[in-house]
Image: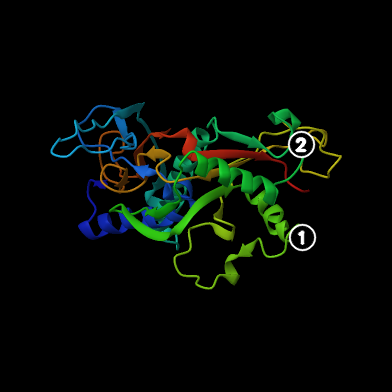
Amino acid sequence: MLKYSDISPRTTAYADRRLLTRAVPNNILGQFGDVRELPSKSSKTIIVRRYNKLAPALTPLMEGVTPSGSTRTKTDYTVSVQQFGDWVGYSDVIQDTHEDPILKDNVDALGEQAAETYDILRAGVLKAGTNVLFTNGTQRSDVNTVISRALLRTAIRILKRQEAKPLRGIIKAGPNISTTPIPAAFIIVCHADLQPDFENLNVTEAGCWTPVHKYANTGGLINGEIGSVGEFRVVIDNNLTPWPDAGGAAITNGLLSTTGTSCDVYPIIILGDHCWAQVPLGGKNGVSTYVNNPKAITGDELAQRGSVGWKGWHAALITQDLWMLRIEAGAKG
């Protein structure tokens, strides 16, 4: 939603659409969370409600007797939204003499910034989940090995035991938030440093890793997807940064380390359906774009300064910790 002073409706639509388009490549985690749009003129608190499953009806029915029925129970999660944004300025000289399209360049840069801002904030929330496995040991400071197929099997067993369901749709950022169906899968999101370790799963177990270029059908790829293993589709997001030097001795296994002493520990986030919720990037009240051409006003009497900016709300929270899981792993150097 673009706010403007003296620009044409055509420019209004162009700037808003372009900012959201440039936001898409960096909007990785936003594809997977339940959407809770912020109603206009409402409070800064959002309540996300999850209805709990019904207990099995194991008592046989009696002829002619209506059972008492069940009452759905619910769990409410409350989170406060916060506002984020930024802007860049430009002069009338640049606007009049520069050969590049200033509005386009500025909107592109701001779109990328907006999406990365939201993604980093979401990553911080998801990295704090309490359902966790370690590639070795029992705590983060022990970790000095890479991901394995055996550990992924353990992860899928834990998730299914806790009745987590695979995702069947992803969120597309845009002026109107929409959901695109995908084949059912649990989603792994991790840093690009871990890509070689996933690819190397084939070294010990042939055929367990499939890169995207070998998919039978490459339609419906997820933004950032690099391949699949078992029931997982693997997506790269560099905003899932490691905890530097937080693991065990790195030199033993030749793992990446910030100082060369202890292993950097990487979060591998596994997402099931309906495990977290978010205020989306895009859609009504999700993000607003502001364009001000240089114009004569008090403080800028000679119309020497213009600006382009964005502003939006953010909230993200885990709504079912048992339906997501974090693996902490090292990365081969």
| Quarter of the view holding residue 319 | top left
Image quadrant in which you'd find residue 316:
top left
Q: Amino acid at mark 1?
A: Val
- SS state under label 1: helix
Give the camera-side residue of 80 and 35: 35
Residue at 43% from the left image edge and 34% from the top image edge? 320
Is 186 drawn above or below residue 77 in the view shown?
A: below
Q: Earlier in the sequence, mark 1 or mark 2?
A: 1
Q: Position of residue 11 (x, y in %)?
A: 27, 58
Q: Is 75 or 239 nearer to us in this picture?
A: 75
Taking the image as drawn, is residue 216 in sight?
Answer: yes
Q: CA distance from mark 1 to mark 2?
A: 22 Å
Please determine whether, in this image, residue 143 is positioned above or below residue 147. Answer: above
Q: Position of residue 291 (x, y in %)?
A: 31, 47
Callout 2 amino acid: Cys
Mark 1, residue position = 203
Measuring from the top left, give residue 119's x and y in whole percent.
48, 43
Q: How is the image coloured?
A: rainbow
Q: Is residue 116 left or right of residue 80?
A: right
Q: Nearer the viewer, residue 185 or 143?
A: 185
Residue 242 x/y as whole percent: 65, 38
Residue annotated with mark 2: 263
